[in-house]
Amino acid sequence: MGRVHITGASGSGATSLGIALAGELGHRHFDADDYYWVPTQPLYTVKRPMPQRIERLEEDLSRHQSWVLSGSLCGWGDRLISQFDLVVFLTLSKGVRLERLRQRETQRFGSTAIEPGGARAIQYDEFMSWAARYDEGGLDVRSRALHEQWLQRLPCPVVRLNSELSVHDLLKSVYRSA
């Protein structure tokens, strides 16, 4: 496994699995969010222009023979498709995903920041509403339908896994499938 892309809905565990797989393989890990978003305080408020995203990501990936890239590239990262040796697509029930996201946002920003009236309450509500629409959304937004369409175009093997499994069990499944 030289160049692996792990994707799925927000909260499906792509970053967690990506970090674990990169560690196991001795590869460098990259996260699409680090290229999609401009580092700001507060986080995740300014999108990096698309040409800059892809240029920066291509430059970083080109420095390594092997890597693991987690996150979603749908709509902006198609130039990378030919570089993938394997794509892992994670699925997870909506309820579990949203609970994971709630926990992650609480850990990142604190419970008081995301509660009504908190410093990030509006952003949190908008984000959770966006994430909740993944399974029903159309091709015009990051959605299951968009991911499925994108996966059909890939020339490399695609492994589909339910990420309710532990990271350890997901790693075993990736190894068996590769």
Image: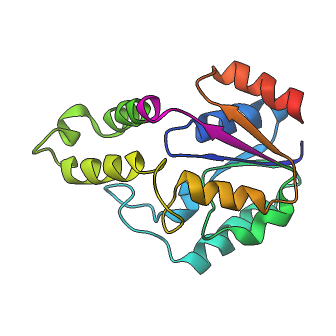
- Given residues 55 and 116, the one toward you in this image is 116
Q: Quadrant of the C terminus?
A: top right
At x 85%, y 61%, the residue is 83
Residue 20 % position (x, y): 69, 31
Q: Is residue 37 above or below residue 10?
A: below
72 sits to left or right of 112:
right
49 displayed left or right of 98: right
Specify the quadrant of the image occupied by residue 152.
Answer: bottom right
Q: In the picture shown, does residue 167 fall above or below 127? A: above
**Residue 151 spot, x, y in % from top left:** 73, 56
Q: Residue 78: which quarter of the image?
A: bottom right
Query: In the displayed structure, would residue 122 be above or below residue 12?
Result: below
Q: Is residue 90 magenta?
A: yes
Quadrant (top left, top right, bottom left, bottom right) of the N terminus? top right
Give, as a single range, the part of the protein colored magenta. Answer: 87-97
- Residue nearest the viewer, comparing 92 with 122: 92
The residue drawn where x is 46% and y is 65% is 38
> Residue, x 80% and y 22% (percent of image)?
172
Q: Is residue 64 visible?
A: yes
